[in-house]
Amino acid sequence: MVAGSVKTPEEAVARIAYLSSDVVISVQPTLSNASAFSAKLEELSSSRVKGTLTASNGVPEVQTVRQNADPLLSVFQPIRSGKLVSVAATSSILLSSIPHLYKLINYPVVIHVSLQPSEFPDYSEITSIRQTGLILLQSESTQEAQDMAIAAHGLAVKTGKAVVHFFASSSDDSEISNEDALLLGRALDRAAARTYQSGKIASTSLYADDGVVAQTSNSVASVAVGANGHASGLVTPASEASGIEPSSNGTSTADENSTRPSLTSISSLHDAIESRPISSDDIYKHASTIFEVIKQVTGRSYNVFEYTGPRNADVALFVFGSTTGLFRSAIRRTPGDDYSRVGVITARLYRPWFGTKLTEVIPKSISKIAVLEQIKKKTTKWGPLFLDLLTCLRTGPALKGAPVIVGHQLGFITPDTASQALRGVVQNLKSESPVQNLSVGLEDVPTNAGHNISQPAIEAAYMKILDQLFGKRLHIANSLDKPNAGISATITASPEYGYGSLLARIERRQAFIERVEKLAKSNDFTTRIPAEWISRWLLVTDDESKSAALVPGIIMRLSVDGSPAAYSLLSDKDLFYKESHWLIGSDAWSYDLGNSGVHHVIASGKDINMLVIDSQPYSEHAVADASRRKKDIGLYAMNFGNAFVASVAVYSSYTQVLHAMLEADKFDGPSVVVAYLPYNREDDSPLTVLQETKKAVDIGYWPLYRWNPRGDEKDEKKFSLDSERLKKELQEFLKRDNHLSQLVKRNPQFAANLSGSYGTEVRQQQKRKAKDAFDKLLEGLSGPPVTILFASDGGNAEGLAQRLGRRGKARGLKTLVLAMEDYPIEDLSTEENLVLITSTAGQGEFPQNGRNFWETVKNSTDLDLATISYTVFALGDSHYWPRKEDKHYYNKPGKDLDKRFADLGGNRLVDTGLGDDQDPDGYQTAYSEWEPKLWKALGVDNVDGFPDEPPPITNEDIKIASNFLRGTIAEGLKDESTGAISASDQQLTKFHGTYMQDDRDLRDERKAQGLEPAYSFMIRCRLPSGVATPEQWIKMDDISNEFGNQTMKLTTRQTFQFHGVIKRKLKSTMQAINKALMTTIAACGDVNRNVMCSSLPQYSAFHAQAHEAATRISNHLLPSTTAYHEIWLTDDDNNKVQVAGDAIVDHEPLYGPTYLPRKFKITIAIPPYNDTDVYAHDIGLIAIKGEDGKLSGFNLLAGGGMGVTHNNKKTYPRTGSMLGYAPLDKIHLVCEKIMLVQRDNGDRKNRKHARLKYTIDDMGVKVFKSKVEDLLTWKLEEARPFKFDSNIDTFGWQKDENGKNHFTFFIENGRIEDTPEFPMKTGLREIAKVHKGEFRLTGNQHLILSDVEDADLENMRDLMAKHKLDNVQFSGLRLSSSACVAFPTCGLAMAESERYLPVLISKLEGVLEESGLRHDSIVMRMTGCPNGCARPWLAEVAFVGKAYGAYNMYLGGGYHGQRLNKLYRSSIKEEEILEILKPLFKRYALERQDGERFGDFCIRIGMIKPTTEGKTFHDDVAEEDAEDGE
Ligand code: SF4
């Protein structure tokens, strides 16, 4: 029965390959870009269809390999272990695979090749491999492809030799049925296959043929058994031709040899003694036999050579191309006699070439044969087929009466042009002296890019850096965008080509130098001037910078000279530069190292630089076949000993790439820079590439290093490892032995494959050991065992589990508490009592440390939990998902667990407890009901007399016990066994200006590797008013490079923040910051933090006064503890430096030992600009001008604050309340008193209710004010009038009242970093080197270059232009936007922010442009969590992270920060965000009133209600809680 349908040749081939192999290598352009074979293979594989020949009748394995990752390398391992392997690929892999093809000829592998480009295939790849010894079979239609695929597999199994089946993918083919199972059964010799599968060939020889010889055994007759149980495969063919073509004839039908059963023959070293190597005759016989089987079963006739046409034809076309069918039908369709004596010949079996059989097929009447070869770029005068025919038909005895052979180049032909082409060929043939090498059809057709090599846009990153570094000196030999007449991109992109062309280039420059030398001595110039200039140049030709410096001058002089000599030099003016020669390659070069030009370049010793871009993602690497690991070009080159080698990754360290490229250029000799850029698809987002890169570098798969073999000679380091991991191992290794080839052996981490599997194994063993040890411990105890497993992100579920464990133990139970991920899951069914406690993450997902456990439990098919009793307690928030359709996320993990355990037969001890944050006591409410039930169910409810549990440690306890913020920080820093510090120290270091974080991009990967998270520290400086000197800027830049992650963040509190500082470097970083005359004390923590101040460039004098006030307040409120100095600024070895020991008792006159209940923030704004968001701080000071134009004092706002907790209506953002006015000289005292009232009245029990905003609301503004006035002993004055216009920055140049100039840079989200597109950090550093004024950081995370004198203006402008820093032409929306850090470093982040807001804005800019809003300022802010670092609740539109990819959307904030916004939608994703905002922006453009701001507009049109004060923030939200409506 034949069922199913097949639409394309690739589908047909994929099916046959799958059914006839153990392993199918599916070659794809990229892993995420399917090939024409992929879908079918995927379909069969996922339905677990069994193969016909698969060993033990299993399901064949489909391996996907990238096209540029040396796909045929994947064949060796399986084929050598006795598996039948086939490959499905396009012809583009063939040329680079030639070295493998030689090695594969004596293995029964089948390579199905779809010729490319599919519209107009080029057969030259096939002719290029004709000498490899492979069997080559061809097909043209879908039906033929199906039949020949079967023949190819039959032949491979039968002969033990490799078969390439090549075919053109024709678009107008009709659908066919699935192959006939009977045919498959009979064409594939099962017995021969089994013989092969039973033996293994363990050869890894480098030599061409592996020493394996395909053999045939003459003595053993083997008859394969077909699907019907009858003998098959070796069948007597039918007698005379009865094919489908009217007059077809072929050699096989007349071959008497095939009338007897054939002999088994299989490639095997284990064959019997009688065996002999397979001969081409054997191949011929087996092919004929298989064709005969096909004919018997299907009626379709195939032959080694096929002739169609009359037996009395006088001319014939021998077609080697994809249009045989078109020619045949054109002949058939043409009425009359024109073509009545024209035949068509094709080669079904192209190699081995059976010339004698061809003569048998061609009617004797034929006198001329046109050979039509579809080979696009001919490299020889006579085509390969032409020569084949000539050799067999016109040499030796055959010459007499042999037909004349006329070569043609076959171009692109369509059904419409086939007749015309045919006419041309036949006319040429029939002419008296036919023209040789005539072209038929179009030479060029539009083809898709599939066939051509093109450099993925993403790789432009490295090109840009080369460009920036070397500019005019850069010469890329194999640049793909350069025209190379007549040479295909495949060739020009190869290292060999590049190498050759660079050698030529080097020689050319040498000749040029000689020419210049001659001219310098001649009188050929009009004046002496050019000769003088070039003489100077001749002294420095080898010095890149000196020669480059002279070039513009020389060119200028030559241009005005006018002499022919000058012109001749000008025509080669590029050669005046000492070029930086580069060859650019892909990771494909890493596969063919031994055979390619890479080692020629290295071995040549020439001054050539190679940049090899490796794009294989690390995660892909993890699943890759270990035996096909790429050659490490870096290690290879290091072993060579004469090359500079660097391993870089632009998304990990831009600076290191710069260093490596510069050093490569400087190095006199070959340099190899291997560059990492992992991507799956060319359109991968930079964020994906960044995350992949980080993982690979962090884990040591891609270490960053530089190796200079001549380092020793210069007393420099030979090897520098620039990434963290492996540094120690490598350095130790290098100390012992500089022979890097040992590295892999001694440090298996270097070979990440090993490390991966080793890590997993160790992890499993650890789990088992821990559990076994615990089991042993329990043996002595009485009472039933209870295993408590938790999954916890925030710590609540873990805390509950631990407490439950302790309480259970006190009741005599044998309790074991483990994170789900640490539990050896194979023990599950042996548990007696199991308690599962889980919180809810993201959109109803499991917390990270429960995910694998859940996946295993969910997917397991053989878990039997009938003997275990279990219960679940879940923690969630029933209001987290207000929309009805999202409600089911509430406590989903817990509910899922309960259901799954019940389904697997578990007995429920107690019903699932559903902890809800919305209950009066949060999750405790449900928990206190659930726990007693559990004790009851376990029979331990009536146990008394166990001790009370100690209350949990609070932040207040930590502060009291810390001895004025010391804790155990100093000891923790010395502990090298971990990158972390203790939990209480983590709270205390905040007071010192540093937080512990971990890189969340790396969390999962490191966990999988059994490593602790990638801990690092964020350090925040204290910088009153955000003013820094240029020297300080440079030092900050140095610190970020040397100690941090090479970026700096300018924060919303106008200060520098560093990320990625590891514990080991923490102290040095603090010291470096102090050396820069900055500090970090009280930058975070429950104290007054950095005091901000408007950066206002226009009113510089006024700013100076305000700045002075800010500094005074900041200093006045600084904590007095000496712990900071003691911990960070003393030398470990020098006790004398220590200023405070035990003898000194600290005293905090303002704060006391417990400091403040919560953080405390002060800011100053100078009207009309509210650029520091004066309403958002605990104290907001509005600068008031006196009658003399100077700063007289401040209006005082108190009780502003941003942080809230999602869905906790007791928390809300608040704008400050106006308390009155205070004069300038007393302002620091007023701030102090406000702080003291908060110190003594703030809520120290509940940190969520501890900010000043709640104290004021609880107390009432009046009472609060009077308490402050009591402490002051005088009354505040009435607030003075003021007016704000906006809360954003003013970009570009401005002049202040003193005539000095200020430029506000746009620094997107405050991130100072270098990227290949925009090396901003380097640019700012260059500017800082010459700037004489100051830098001012703004509260919107931007930067002002302040106080530039007119005289320096031009220089500054030039510098800014050079570094592209003068661009402020962004949309109004972008200029008014701001985002917090969030991922990857912020531990609280629930969603992306800094990395995502720019992307979101780009997606909105189109609509803004269309609506004419490009220049309109709309304040948009985003934060990754409701902590609110970027002050989102004062923005006109804001997004606050709720879960990864999901945000709460707020609308209606006041334009100048005076009004809070309100929740508009919950948990929406990008699509919905765009759906809401795009039409809203359009509407705003059309319907706004004069001067109406977006936030006000949203309120006027009724989109959102205004929030009048913090307390009403949760009222009247646009999206009501679904439950309320139920
Ligand atoms: S708002 Fe939240 S996510 Fe963003 S930086 Fe602050 S704490 Fe982190």
Image (cartoon, rainbow, N blue to C red):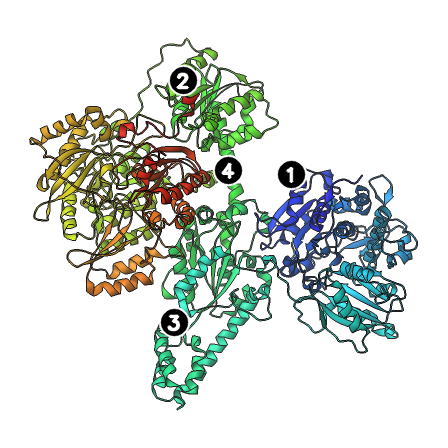
Please, what secondary structure does the residue beneath circle 4 have?
helix
Q: Is mark 2 within 8 Å of ligand 1?
A: no
Q: Amino acid at mark 1?
A: Ser
Write the residue at 26% across / 32% down: 1214
Expressed as whole percent of the image width and height from the top left, the position of residue 728 reads 40, 49
For marks 2 and 4, give the one nearer the viewer: 2
In the image as oriented, which residue stretches furthest toward the right?
239
- In front: 1220, or 1084? 1220
Residue that carries the numbered disc 3 in the rendered image: 544
Question: Do the numbered discs 2 and 3 sit on residues whose CB atoms are within 8 Å?
Answer: no
Please tell me whether mark 3 sits on a helix, a strand or a loop.
Answer: helix
Which residue is labeled 4 in the image?
762
Can residue 279 be spotted in the picture? yes
Please determine whether, in this image, residue 592 is positioned above or below residue 56. below
Name the amino acid, label 2: Ala
> Which one is earlier in the sequence, the residue at label 3 or at label 4?
3
**The C terminus is located in which quarter?**
top left
In whole angstroms, how far apart are the C-alphas of marks 2 and 4?
39 Å
Please provide percent x and percent y for residue 1148: 15, 34
The type of residue carrying mark 3 is Glu
Query: Which numbered disc flags the more N-terminal residue, 2 or 3?
Result: 3
Q: Residues within 10 Å of mark 1 (few under 14, many from 20)?
A: few
Q: In the rendering, which numbered label is found on residue 46?
A: 1
Numbered mark located on residue 926 in the image: 2
Q: Work out how far the residue at label 4 is from the one at label 1, CA to CA, in angstroms.
A: 32 Å
Is 863 placed above or below 1413 here?
A: above
In the shown orientation, is residue 114 left or right of residue 505? right
